[in-house]
Structures are given as C-alpha cells and as structure tokens.
Amino acid sequence: MPSLTPQELKKLLLSEGFEVYRTLSDRVVLADRVRDNLIMDSGVCALTQDGALGVRVIFRSQACDFQGESPEGLFGHARRLGQPAESHGFAEASASVVPIHDPGDRSRVLDTWYEVGYERPVADATELVTELKAALTWSKVASRAGA
C-alpha cells in the first residue's frame, strides 16, 4: 500500500465509519463520543509515518483516583490496562507524566495523568481498521474499582 498523508488517512477512516477527533502531522486521533453533544479524544490513533501505517493506544491512570500511590504504582495501573494491547502484538512505546492544568489558571495543576503508550505497525488498511476497532473497545483509564 502506498504511503498515505494524514488527510488521506482521515478520509479512509471516515469512509470506514470512524469519527475523527483531530488530525496531526503524523496521525489521526479517533473520537470517543461520551454523549451526543460531547466528543472527546479516545486515546486511539491511526499512525502514518515514513510510509508505514500503525496504531497507537494511550492507557492512563489519574493521580487523584489513586491518592498516595507512587509514580511506579500509577504507571503499573496503566500498564495493566495495556495487557489486551500486548496480546494483540502492541509494544510499549512511551511512558509520560502529564500535568492537567486549570484552564483558568495555568499555574495551578488540577491532576496528573500517568500515561503509557502502546504501538503496533500494520500491513495494510484492512489490518489498520481491524486493530482500531479492537483498540476502541479496551478500557483506557484506570479506576479504583479496577485496581
């Protein structure tokens, strides 16, 4: 399959019934519609880099949900959520700490997310669609109930 630009990838995904949250220089972020009038980032992206296609999924735990836990423990919750991805051939590609700032006062941190990103290359558009559909079904935010 020839290399796709992000805009071409977006058109392909829309034709397959996916909802797009945003398009970046190397990826198309899929949307998660939590209510009819509210669309959010799903944590699932279709990648197009250097002529190759892939899927990226972000799993996270939020510090406020696990009061007093160490960063290692918080990353551990996110990695446990990533186990279905690993069974689909995804590999851990990143781990990051993301402060969530108050939109009214950027100096104030409301929460901190501990995110682990998993990626998997795919051979073609058919495999891309299959893996994106699977990734959208996985829980991506750890909760105390699931701890």
Image (cartoon, helix red, strand yellow):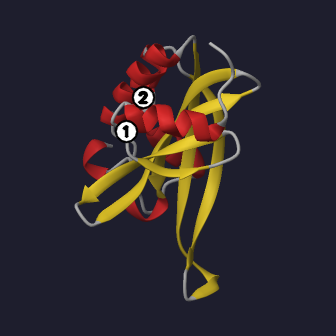
Circle 1 sits in a helix, a strand or a loop, which is it? loop
Q: Quadrant of residue 112?
A: bottom right
Q: Earlier in the sequence, mark 2 or mark 1?
A: 1
Q: Quadrant of the C terminus?
A: top left
Q: Where 93 sits versus 147, above or below?
A: above
Look at 45% across and 34% down and name the residue there.
13
Horizontal side of residue 4 vs 132, given as left or right: right
Count neighbours of disc 2 (C-alpha within 10 A) and say few if under 14, some if 14 to 19, many if 20 or more: many
Q: Quadrant of the N terminus?
A: top right
Q: How many marks?
A: 2
Q: Which three-letter amino acid code belongs to the residue tagged 2? A: Leu
Circle 2 sits in a helix, a strand or a loop, which is it? helix
Instruction: Return the residue at label 1.
Output: 18
Look at 27% across and 67% down and name the residue there.
37
Disc 2 and disc 1: Cα gap in Å? Answer: 9 Å
Q: Quadrant of residue 88?
A: top left
Look at 61% across and 59% down and name the residue there.
98
Count neighbours of disc 1 (C-alpha within 10 A) and say few if under 14, some if 14 to 19, many if 20 or more: some
Q: Nearer the viewer, residue 131 or 1?
A: 1
Whether residue 68 is visible to the viewer of this picture, yes or no, is no
Q: Nearer the viewer, residue 134 or 87?
A: 134
**Can you give x and y, in whole percent of width and height, for residue 122 in the image?**
56, 15
What's the mark number on residue 132?
Answer: 2
- Label 2 with label 1: CB-CB less than 8 Å: yes
Q: Which three-letter amino acid code belongs to the residue tagged 1? A: Phe
**Can you give x and y, in whole percent of width and height, for residue 36 in the image?**
22, 61
